[in-house]
Image: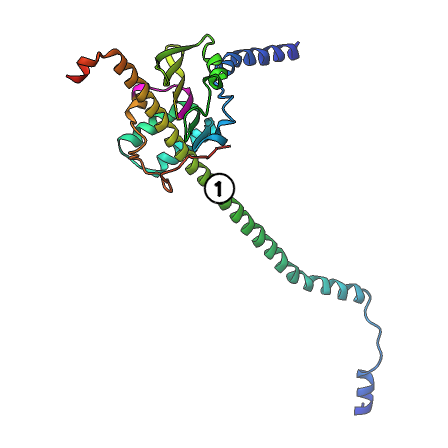
Amino acid sequence: MNLEDELRAALRRDNPSPGFAERVVARAQSSARPARAIPRMMWAAAIAALLVIGFSTAYEYREMKAERASRDAVVALRIAADKLNIARERVLRRETPADTREN
Amino acid sequence: MRRLFLIAVIAGCAAAQLPAQLLQLRITGLDGLAAKAKESTDITLDSNLLKMAGGFLAGAGKDGKDGDTIKQLLSGLKAITVRSFEFKEPGQYRLEDLEPIRVQLRTPGWSKIISSQSKDEISEIYTRMEQGKVAGFAIINAEPKELTVVAIEGSIDLKDLSKLGGLGIPSISVPGQSKDSGKKGKQE
């Protein structure tokens, strides 16, 4: 066989084996998978970040509310104590005769 | 039959709760005074907020005589309501404004333990007892230029409360607490 025949044999038109098209499509799909995994990871990271921000905001809000409540509670109790003592003092003053108070 | 039993149980629970709700003092009739007042304090704390406050104070770790007393007092409380008004001039409120509150305090369950009445000053202290313990406490203090009503629900030791003393010397420091804290504020 000379060179010309060898080239002709090598470059001859040949039909693909059965199922070639399906195999190509399948290969193309399988190679596309890693590309889709990246957006999924990004979604997961975004959701995780949102959850962290949400929880920390809720915690901060709760702390702020508790701080304000504690401040108000202290003020309320002090007002109550103040008025209680004023009332007791008035009653004592009324019950104690003036000359006894002076001594 | 089962449904009837369930309804009976719910009705029983509701009936048991009813007297306590009826005896709970509501400070009404003073809303218009805030506009006339030079300074007003409006504090309403329910059981949830009191729990949060107690937790916050415990977490703050501020020890000291008053701090411990406040934490102890808060632990037994279910609600605190304070309405206090300071006016520039006398005659900005009428004693009749207090009538809706006094009507509630005349109902069975409440008893007046201290009453001092002079020409232009009134100090009244009421308590509500439940099973030998103080379950409610109310103060009405009326002066020519000042009016204060305090309603406290829950068990409270009046001796401990009186130990807290005046407003001027806060020995417990709450982060971010200012001199005018609570003024014109309302918890919701």
| Closer to us: B100 or A53 | B100
Going 37% across and 16% down the picture, which residue do you hit? B125
Q: Which amino acid does label 1 sit on?
A: Tyr
Q: Which colour scheme is used?
A: rainbow
Q: Which residue is identified by label 1?
A: A61
Q: Give the range drawn in magenta.
A: B146-159
Residue A10 visible in rendering: yes
Q: Which chain carries label 1?
A: A
**Residue B24 higher or lower than B178, as above or below:** above
Tag 1: Cα neighbours inside 10 Å, few (<14), some, or many (≥20)? few
Give the x, y percent position of residue A90: 29, 17
Give the x, y percent position of residue B113: 35, 12
In which quadrant will I find the N terminus of chain A?
A: bottom right
Give the x, y percent position of residue B74: 38, 27
Going 61% across and 13% down the picture, which residue do you hit? B6
Left or right of residue A60: residue A50: right
Which image quadrant is residue A75 in? top left
**Residue A77 higher or lower than B173, as above or below:** above
Residue A2 visible in rendering: no
**Residue B13 higher or lower than A29, as above or below:** above
Residue ranking furthest to the top = B108
Q: Is residue B13 located in the magenta-colored stretch of the structure?
A: no
Left or right of residue B162: residue B55: right
Prevailing SS of the magenta stretch? strand
Which structural element holds mark 1? helix
Give the x, y percent position of residue A67: 41, 38
